[in-house]
Each structure stands twice: as structure tokens, then as C-alpha cells.
Image (cartoon, helix red, strand yellow):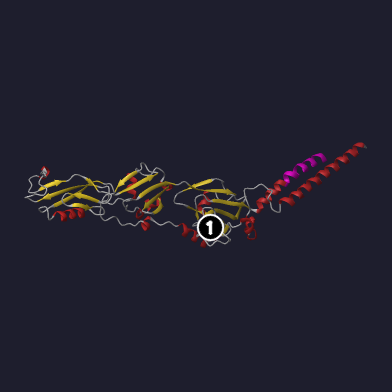
Amino acid sequence: MSAIMTLKHFKKTIMRIQLAALATVALLGSVILPGCTALPGSGFLRSDLEPDKVEQKLNGIQLVEITDSVARQVLAQRATRLFSEALGTDPIDARVVGPGDVLEVSIWEAPPASLFGSATNDARLGPQTSRVTSLPEQMVSKDGVINVPFAGPIAAAGRSLPQIENEIVQHLKAKAHQPQVLVRLIRNGSSNVTVVGDVGTSALVPLTPRGERLLDALAAAGGVRQPVHKTTIQVTRGSSVHSLPLETIIRDPKQNVPLHPGDVITALFQPLSFTALGATGKNEEINFEAQGITLAQALARIGGLNDARADAQGVFLFRFETPATLAWPQQPVLLTPEGKVAVIYRADLREPRTFFVAQSFPVNNKDVLYVSNASAAELQKFLNLVFSVVYPFATATTVLQR
């Protein structure tokens, strides 16, 4: 009799345990299912950024749907001018003299020469009927002049060698007998370009009447040290600065522009990257080329969306933009201390047209690409949690009832 009572008591205990398990499940459901905030996850859900929640959650951060119109506006803002447009393609007509150049002036007089009577014959010229006087080499001063005996200060800067020769002849005509003048450039001190950055050797490259171009200067400096597709070339001319990927310059000969004196060429190695998070094929920092990549390419490089977890309507791109990029929907606009706008771009991959837009929408350096979990994935997490609680009790009950 006591054994029967003990068995009945045991069964009642099992029933109490089952009821407690069911109560636990109900409690978990009431707490977890409404917001799914207690479940483990990699980030927010698309439902967290529904229109009625945007103002409260974002507080000035911009949420923008990626459309064809938006892609065109973003591309227009980040478009860079080609070197052929910004720097021109016309070569310098003639080599002009500048401060720092070293010149040699030679003067001939027809006999009977008297002004430069102390001059000696140049044996290399053979029998002469005139005398040649070679003046000591002199550097063009910072004021742009040289000095010639009996001719005085001669303006040299900004003039070609023939123009300087004619100027000296005009000054000597009334003093020398049929003077003829030859001016030679001994050392180039003004017509150079500077090549620095990720090159073989930083160098000061002289320009000649041949008309050196951009790639000539890079070659003279030993070429670039990094892969071509990861190198950007920056040209500083006066107060203007322009940049292009080296790959573009090589591919398009028009961008191999003629150089001007004083140009500064900088080879920049820029390891551009974006970060992939959430329900993607892989979560990591992804490097890309200086040429840039599109959203479609970025999705491909992260292995696409995780088919078991991803919400195809919840593809988000986090970025800082300039205020003039778009007409921002959320007002007032939240600006960073650097004057940038915090923006979240959303792509709906359930829409076929989005795949066309993604082929042109650019991904910028340091962007964060995030893909949210689908609601069904959150439900699956909850069910797994429920089963992990209930299954041990159910198994124990079955075993004990046997």
C-alpha cells in the first residue's frame, strides 16, 4: 500500500515539474517574443527602424532608401575630375629660364673687335674671323636677372634662351661690333617636378623641352612600390590638388598629362576597406582597390547574405557624408564635430530593381555594411531555447513513467 502511495506521489511531482516547465515557457514567451531583445544576436532588426520608430531611435541620424535617384546624387558628389580636365593636356611650348638656373653666355664680335679685346680664340672653331668671349657661369638671381658686362642687368626669368640672347644683342649693338650671343643652360635649377610618396626614390626630376609627362616622372623616381591597383597619384599644382588611381592613368593615356615646373607628384598607398557585420557570408574587414567598388561587388566579396538568417530587406550601409550630398529627410540634421552627416542607407534586395542600383552605388572607405536577421530567424532562436528547456523535462518524465 505504501508503494502505491509513493508512486502516486512521484507522478504528482512529475506533473508539477511539467507544469513548472510549461510556466517557464509561457514566461519566456511573454518576455522574449514581443521584442526579441533578450535573444542572442549580432545587431538590430529591420523592424527596429520602421517609420514610426525612426525619429525616436535615430535622433537626427539619417535613414535613406537606396534608389536610382539617390545613387545618382551620391555619385555626382563623389565624382573626381580627370587630370585631363583639371590639369590640361597642352605641353609647355618652350623651356623658359627661372631663378636658380645656371647660364653660360658666349659673345662673338666681328673684327676688328675692341669691346671684348681680351678674349681668346676658341681653337675648337678653327680659323676665325671673329673673337668669342665666354663669360663665367652665373645663376639667375631670385629677382630673375643676370649681369652681362657693358649690357648691365638682363631680365632672364620667364624667357626662353633665344629671347635672352636677343636682349643681350640689343644692349650691345651700340657698343660692340656686330655682336652675336649664345646662351646655354648649364644647370637646371627652376624647371623641375618633385616626386615623393610610395616611390622607389623620392626625386627632383628636371623638365626638358621634350615635355616630360606624369608617368615619365614616376619612372625617373623608380616607379611605385605598391601594387598599381592600390596606388593613388596626387598632383599638386599651385594651390590646386587633384587625385586619380594610378590604374586609371595607365589605362587612359589622356590622363598621363604633361608636367609643369613646380608640380608635386605624390604616390599614395591607400589600403581602403569596409567592415561587414550581421547575417553575411563572413564578418570581417574587407580591403578593396583604389579604383573603388560598388555595393553589388561588396556583397559578393562577403559571400552574399546568409540564407538561413538574413533579412533581404534589411541591408544597411553606415557612412558619414558631406551635408551637400542629399536633401536629408530627418530634421534637424545631426552633424559630427568634423561637419559630417551620419547616414544609414537601406537596400531592399527583395526588389529586383535594387540589384541594378547596387551596381552603381559606391562603397566608401571605412563604411560599415550590416545585414539584419530575419524575424523567422529570431523565432527559430526562441524555439531552440524553448526546446532546450522543455526537452530535458520531457525526456526525464518519459523515462520515469516507464
Q: What residue appears at the point 81 percent right and 39 percent down from the top-left corner?
A: 400
Point out the image quarter for the N terminus. Answer: top right
Is 397 included in the stretch rendered in magenta? yes
> Which residue is labeled 1 in the image?
355
Task: From the top left corner, tell me how far across and down residue 255 is, in percent.
Answer: 36, 54
Residue extent of the magenta highlight: 386-401
Residue 323 position, x and y percent, is 51, 58
User: In this image, 87 relative to 31: left or right?
Assistant: left
| Residue 185: % across, % down | 22, 47
**How many marks are shown on the rendered structure?**
1
Given residues 307 and 325, the one toward you in this image is 325
Residue 34 magenta-highlighted: no
Report the side of 91 relative to 47 (left or right): left
Type of amino acid at the residue the image marks with label 1: Phe
Most foreground residue, 36 or 309: 36
Q: Position of residue 396 (x, y in %)?
A: 78, 40
Would residue 402 be seen by someone viewing this image from the given angle? no
Disc 1 element: helix
User: Which secondary structure type mostly characterizes the magenta part of the structure?
Assistant: helix
Quadrant containing the C terminus is top right
Crowd tier of the residue under label 1, counting other residues whose Cα lies within 10 Å: few below 14, some 14–19, many 20 or above: some
Image-based side of 149 in relation to 47, left or right = left
